[in-house]
Amino acid sequence: MAPAFLHRLLSSLVSLLPIRLRAKMWKRLHKLGTRRWERQSFAQRCPGGIYIKTSKLLRLSEGQALQFIRTHTPLPVPVVIDNIEHAGSVWLVTSLLPGFSLAEVYRDITPEIERKLSSQLSRILAPLRALPPPDPVCGFDGGPVYCARIRFGAPPAGPWDTVEAFHGDLMHRAGEINVPGEPYCAKTTEEVYDVIRRAHARTHRVCLTHNDLGPHNILVDDHWNITGIVDWESCAWMPEYWEVTKGTFLPQYRKNRWPRIMSAAFPMYTLEQEAEMYMIEYRQCYV
């Protein structure tokens, strides 16, 4: 695996070339990667310790977010070698980080490892969460947010002028919340609404948020040390609790290990987690 400074040097040299030539070069390297390693959907491993993401659905904001995070925090994120748009497709070229996906060893996580991961997440994400935000709740670039929790399929939504406006939109999109009662839920519909109202009434800072922080986007080594956080395409400025609630949104991570890990890393958001759980479980529509 090439050292980071070599990837930074490559980035400087590549930036001198015309965009058309760069796109052609990355296309050829991408093809080499698919021959040597298993073909992947958006992100393809390539020779030289490089990953290439390309799609007509990809946005330049992911590469911009990575560059911003590397500049302003010590987070373990890839070096951006190139980030261009050509012929309707975005080409995001980054360095390969060490480690393997936490999702691959998810079933091997013990209570002791849960505590180790929680401690690391709390420490690693602290500089990201301390960055001064813009005024609105918005995407990294100040535009809409792309988030499957907010809108099915993650079409753009927002931005919102305030956290209160964001919460109002969440409730509007959820429609009427109708709780089935015992034995499915110990609370009545009114009690569930009360939990949501109390959670939304709290004062929340706006923080830079990965917005899809699950085991599938975290890299670890053989000793369960976090070596990288990848896939920042949904990165956005969100209410401070959102990293926790969105991180446990995917069905495979709503129970057991991952909610415990995230709750231990950020124990101050138990009410918000409960409110989100009710909104996801008992909403009547998803628009």
Image: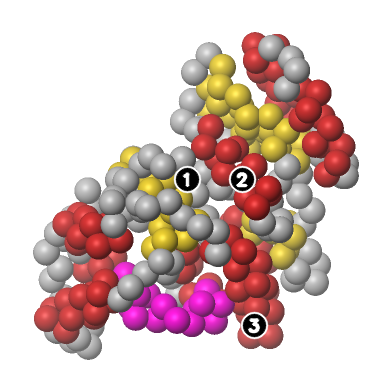
The amino acid beneath tag 1 is Phe
Q: Mark 2 points at which residue?
A: 68
Residue 49 is left or right of residue 257, and the answer is: right
The amino acid beneath tag 3 is Arg
Q: Name the residue under label 3.
A: 115
Visible residue check, residue 233: yes
The amino acid beneath tag 2 is Phe
Tell me if residue 156 comes above or below residue 179 in the rendering. Answer: above
Taking the spot 55% from the left edge, 26% from the top edge, the residue there is: 90
Foreground residue, 65 or 99?
65
Quick check: marks 2 and 1 in contact, CB under 8 Å? yes
Label 2 secondary element:
helix
Foreground residue, 133 or 223?
133
Label 1 secondary element:
loop
Residue range highlighted in magenta: 262-276
Tell me if residue 172 comes above or below residue 91 in the rendering. Answer: below
Taking the spot 45% from the left edge, 75% from the top edge, the residue there is: 255
Q: Is the magenta stretch mostly helix, strand or loop?
A: helix
Taking the spot 65% from the left edge, 52% from the top edge, the residue there is: 72
Q: Name the residue under label 1.
A: 140
